Amino acid sequence: MNTLIALSGLGLMTLFSEIFGFKKIIRPIILIGLLTALVFSVADWNTNQSLFNDMVLVDNYAVAFSTLLIGLTLLWFLLCNNLFFDPVTEVDHSALAVFALIGAVCMTMYSNMIMLFLGIEILSISLYVLAGADKTNLASNEAAIKYFLMGAFATGFLLFGIALTYGATGSFSLAAINTAVSNGPGPNMMMLTAGVLLLLIAMSFKVSAAPFHFWAPDVYQGAPTAVTAFMSTVVKTAAFAAFLRLFSTVFSSNTEVWSSTLWAIAALTILLGNIAAAAQENIKRMLAYSSVAHAGYMLLAILAMNQLAAGALFFYSVAYSLSSLLSFSILLIISQKTGSETISGFRGLFKSNPLLAVLTIVAMLSLAGIPPTAGFFAKYFVFTAALDAGYLGLVILAVAGSLIGVYYYFRPLMAVFTPSSDSQEFSVDKTTVFVLVLLAIASLALGISPRWLTALFS
Amino acid sequence: MLPLLSTLIFLPLLGGLITFFSGVNARKTALAVALVELALSLWVLLAHFVPTAGMQLVEDYWWVESLGISYKMGLDGISMALVLLTTVLVPLIILSAFGRDVKSPSLYFGLILLMQSALIGVFASLDGFLFYLFWELALIPIYLICLNWGGENRTRITLKFFIYTLFGSLLMLVAFIWMRAQTANQSFDIDQFYALKLSSDAQSWIFWALFLAFAIKMPVFPFHSWQPDTYTDAPTQGTMLLSGIMLKMGIYGVIRWMLPVLPIGVDTWGLLAASLAVAGIVYASLIAWVQKDFKRLIAYSSIAHVGMIAAAVFTLSTQGLLGSVVQMLSHGVNVVGLFLVADILLHRTGTRDLGQLGGIRSVAPAFATTFIIILLGAVALPLTNGFIGEFMLLSGIFRYNITLASLAGLSVIFGAVYMLRAYRIIMLGEQQSSSATFADLVWNEKAVLYTLVVLIFLFGVYPDPLIRLVGPSVEHLQEVITNAGAATLR
């Protein structure tokens, strides 16, 4: 509870800072606020409390994911300090990001459909605005509109799904729905099936799984890179946390209704994401499609739905977020220096800034899932969970998908070493370098000793 | 007491990291580390290793207990021999780059040491997951070496190399994960794998999954298409690492992780695998015959040599297995020498094209002499190291299948023909303008080549210590295979 209150307070304070004239110190305030929320969140470990008339259940699953989300937002703010914010809009954008985080945290700890809906909407509405943050840029405006329209669609599906489930089971509470579902097929069987499938589609929209992924590449590419980084880390993690929570607590006893559909969605997502990513010249778009592909791998954990699933999904979220934040930040720095978001921007990086080149290598290796990076163990855990649940065919498909992944992740990696005539040495400010190195070290440390995280869920 | 084996594995890693920051002294630092590592390995061999005692210097700790992954390391005669090969060759490989222009040397030599660390890790791992991990770790430094210091087409070629080998190793990982699920206590421990009694269907598919992984690395025909390009395009030290040591990972993988686990699979499919290997010998020998680029010629000859080793491994005979280990060492020594010769040719004359070389012997006698000795070792002349290994391999194959043996034997003759032809053109032949001013060997080239020559003769004349080191482990391995086969059938 403290976490949510602290975050909400922080959000409001950020908004008011302009009115009450303490705008100058807003950055430290946000950092301290997020740190406080982080501490509150960690303190909730093992408390397992139910709050707000059973609207929220703070179990360890929720604590782990919300701590991750707050930590990611903290790192994101540190990285964005000088790269994204400008003095005029800083306050608005910061406040929106904090509000988005509140929505994300709700999505990890809900125990009632209403809370899920609220969380998704708080998150999404903030993001629609953030996607259009670069007001003078046509692409950014397009991204915002597209995201808004598609998001509204998904919300429609979500509401229909919730309504039909309510109609079939008579409750919004996850626990009550679970009891009703596990009692076996009742008179409202059809209604429940339709509800589950609509929910599945809505969640697939939110995690950008194929064939509901069409918004993702355009929005990711059009939005300012910093916002894209936020979307691919915080938003994605929150969406998956909500997805797994919903299906594992509520619909685990009627898997036959939705598992074959999800199987097809996962297979399609892995294939489409990887193949489309391989064809991109623009790195940002490539990362957007790769984000779709990663969603496909993460769906394996939801499909597996065994005791390994939560741990595997959490590890994957951590690993993917670390390397994704790293690669988008590098891309942001490079595109600001060279004005190019294509692969040519990476040429000669090894000469012009060796540290950034090494960080690029770590990020790409982790995204491609090569040891000794966290990305490797992430894939390993997810694939093992799926194998344990008997999805051998899908795992083989996923392995093939990761091979395609190696192809496109290695293109920037190779470009780094390609000599370039016009590469000039440049430096990056200290805070950014510090955070980036921290992300890289975390990626490597988790790749060498994954035990630190896996212990949480066993 | 100090964990000796871990020290042996992680010393080069540490040395590599130090080398990254050593600036202009990179070569000397790297060489010093490699020499310390060599001394350490020799000390381990002489003071702490008993060839007859099975797995030694074992270190066994949990790493990720919930997944059955342990940090389990150990050496027997076979792995000790390969560790020694690595520790002997790496200093020579580093030394061979002295006096050559290398851009960002600290990174280059640091990566070579990282590679050494991973290679020793592969040879010492007794846990399937750990083995896979070191296997992949060895790939990254060599990939970066080829990518940043390679020739013209490196981007395309190295990517093909990487994806090819990664594909193989992922198959291996899937097979290992599946086998783990079948073990009694859900672990990747090699002893648990050895104790598995898999059905013959399971053994068949695992055989092919593992065979693909190892065959791509060696490479065995028809999975070799990455190899000639990569060998030719990689920088000399990269090629030496790939051919001298890294391809032995594949053969070692077959010996350690395939034969004892899949006796039925090997029995069913071994002949086919051996036939592929022999087909590769003939195919590669014929292509080597018509090569114009000397480095490419060695690359193809390497496919032929490795094919012979691979074929002998699948015979499961004492001579075949023993011969394969001996020949792995000999091939490592010879091929590093040959690639250094190719490097010297290119460095002095600017070309490796046989058509533009000739008459070098008269201006560079020391070079000519060492070249012919290494070459004779490679074509298995008696009293050289190549002969011992090749002889054992052939006699092993002969007892297994006469047709295969005669085809493989033919390739020995082919090998002599194309190698000597290359020597005739380059060293004798008509004096070409490019080679009139050919300077003879300088100190570091002498140091490397003379060391190799000593090794060639040493093991050619007196192979006994090597055989005593490897022999008991091979016999023990055969027992394991026989017992496993009998247990599965029962």
Image (cartoon, coloured by chain):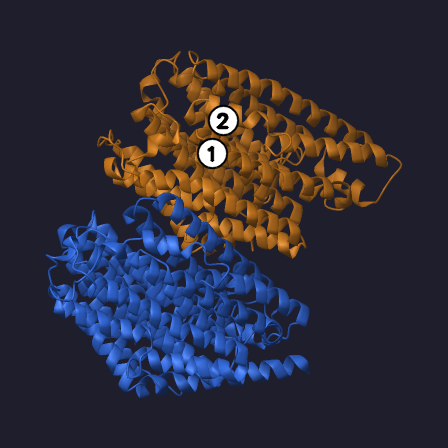
Chain colours: A orange, B blue
Are callouts 1 and 2 both on one chain? yes
Q: Amino acid at mark 2?
A: Tyr
Mark sitting earlier along the chain (1/2) = 2
Q: CA distance from mark 1 to mark 2?
A: 9 Å
Q: Which mark is residue A287?
A: 1
Tell which residue pokes out farthest to the front in this image.
B430
For the point 47% across and 60% down, the residue is B216
Front position in the image: A269 or B165: B165
Estimate how packed mark 1 is, as few (under 14), some (14 to 19) or many (20 or more) residues with alpha carbons within 10 Å: many
Front position in the image: A408 or B424: B424
Residue B414 occupies quadrant: bottom left
Q: Amino acid at mark 1?
A: Leu
For the point 64% across and 82% down, the residue is B487
Q: What is the chain letter for disc 2?
A: A
Q: Is residue A93 left or right of residue B456?
A: right
SS of the residue at dot 2? helix
Do tag 1 and tag 2 residues touch (Cβ < 8 Å)?
yes
Residue A52: give x, y in percent of width and height.
63, 32
Front position in the image: B386 or A42: B386
Residue B8: give x, y in percent of width and height.
30, 69
Estimate how packed mark 2 is, as few (under 14), some (14 to 19) or many (20 or more) residues with alpha carbons within 10 Å: many
Residue B443: give x, y in percent of width and height.
11, 65
Residue A425 occupies quadrant: top left
The N terminus of chain B: image quadrant: bottom left
Q: Which residue is mark 2?
A: A220
Check the image and report above or below for A17 versus B157. above
SS of the residue at dot 1? helix
Check the image and report above or below for B191 versus A70. below
Q: What is the chain letter for disc 1?
A: A
The C terminus of chain B: image quadrant: bottom right
Residue A78: give x, y in percent of width and height.
35, 31
Front position in the image: A194 or A355: A355
